[in-house]
Amino acid sequence: MTSSPETPKIERFSSALPFWLSLGLVPIAIFAAMQGGWAIALLPLSTWYLFTFLDYVVGNNTQNPDLETPEEQLFWYRLITLLWAPIQLVTIFGIMIYVAQTDHLSRVEEWLLFAALGILSGTIGITYAHELMHQKPKLERWLADILLASVLYSHFRSEHLLVHHRYIGTPRDPVTARYGESFYRFFPRVLYQSLVSSFKAEKGMLARKNLPWFHRSNPFWLYWALQGGFVLLAWVIGGWWGVFLFVTQAFWAVFQLELVDYVEHYGLTRKHLGDGKYEHVLPRHSWNAAQQASNWLLINLQRHSDHHYKPNRRFPLLQTYDEDDAPQLPFGYPLMTMIALVPVAWRKTMNPRVKEWRKQYYPEIKDWKPYKNASNPMPR
């Protein structure tokens, strides 16, 4: 594990302030709605492109925070994740009300605006929901459900907690991108498989309690209620066009999420031990990225190797690893997701790294064909 001469402590608001940069997207979104035209491009420019540039300027952060930091010193880090749900809802539906009551934007501009808002609710909203769903307080889990419902992807909570973390790096995890699989094959596959696997996981948990799937404790009832409520609100504000715009931002938010999912585990697999068993999850089973600016934007999501190793660890305490313990991405998520959209460039960038990962961590495995894709003959 990478370490520094002095393990930094987390104490003051000033140290948490860079993680509040996401708030800057709100006035940009409002300006884009009021201005239209070229201003709509400011949302993708201020996330994908700006933070790619900042990563180049700021460089990497390989320091690790003190794991003994008391909870009360994390207040300013937690607060931004708690505030984001109401901020996001007010932004999206406030802009929808504005669009419904004005006519200075064309239909195409309105569509582009809400597609751009999907960057805000996907890059920031789902990332924060991911942090919140892993925590014990009910308020944080509720906020996660609200954020996920606002992008019509509520089942992500069940899929992530019950399927992904348990089966990461195995054929049973839809979200682990297979070696050689392009994003354009991954995306439709994961949309279907994650929905099915999450419902089956909740159904299985109820069955172990001798309860039917339709029992009121099945969280899918909550998921459907929250999602239906948001769709109804969009209809009240803007009719069927309002629903279309709401679904547009939801689609592009999910698109952002699954792009990141694709990057996080591409080609990485856990060793099969026989009888359907796999080795324990280790930092080596997720790609790690130490780029500091994009970790500010994504609240350390790129320290993904440690997240899967210690899933309940709050984001300011996540550790980074060097190449001896975890595979390293060459760039931060903003640039990596853009590369993922060009399969030829992605394969050229990542396939050699996957092959090196195999040699480094599993030199004893000579035949990787059984690990190639979800249809392999390995026991389930």
Image (tube, rainbow, N blue to C red):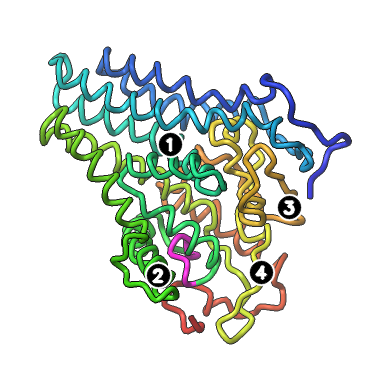
Mark closest to the chain's N terminus, 2 or 3: 2
Mark closest to the chain's N terminus, 4 or 1: 1
The residue indicated by pointer 4 is 280
Q: CB of mark 4 within 8 Å of CB of mark 1? A: no
Write down the quadrant of residue 104 in the picture.
top left
At 57% from the left and 43% from the top, the residue drawn is 301
Q: Nearer the viewer, residue 80 or 194?
A: 80
Q: Amino acid at mark 2?
A: Leu
Mark closest to the chain's N terminus, 3 or 1: 1
Cα separation between marks 4 and 1: 30 Å
253 left or right, relative to 350 = left
- SS category of the residue bearing label 4: loop
Q: Amino acid at mark 4?
A: His
Predominant secondary structure in magenta?
loop
At 55% from the left and 49% from the top, the residue drawn is 134
Cα separation between marks 4 and 3: 19 Å
- SS category of the residue bearing label 3: loop
Q: Amino acid at mark 1?
A: Gly
In the image, residue 118 above or below residue 100: below
Residues in magenta, as a range: 171-179
Circle number at residue 206:
2
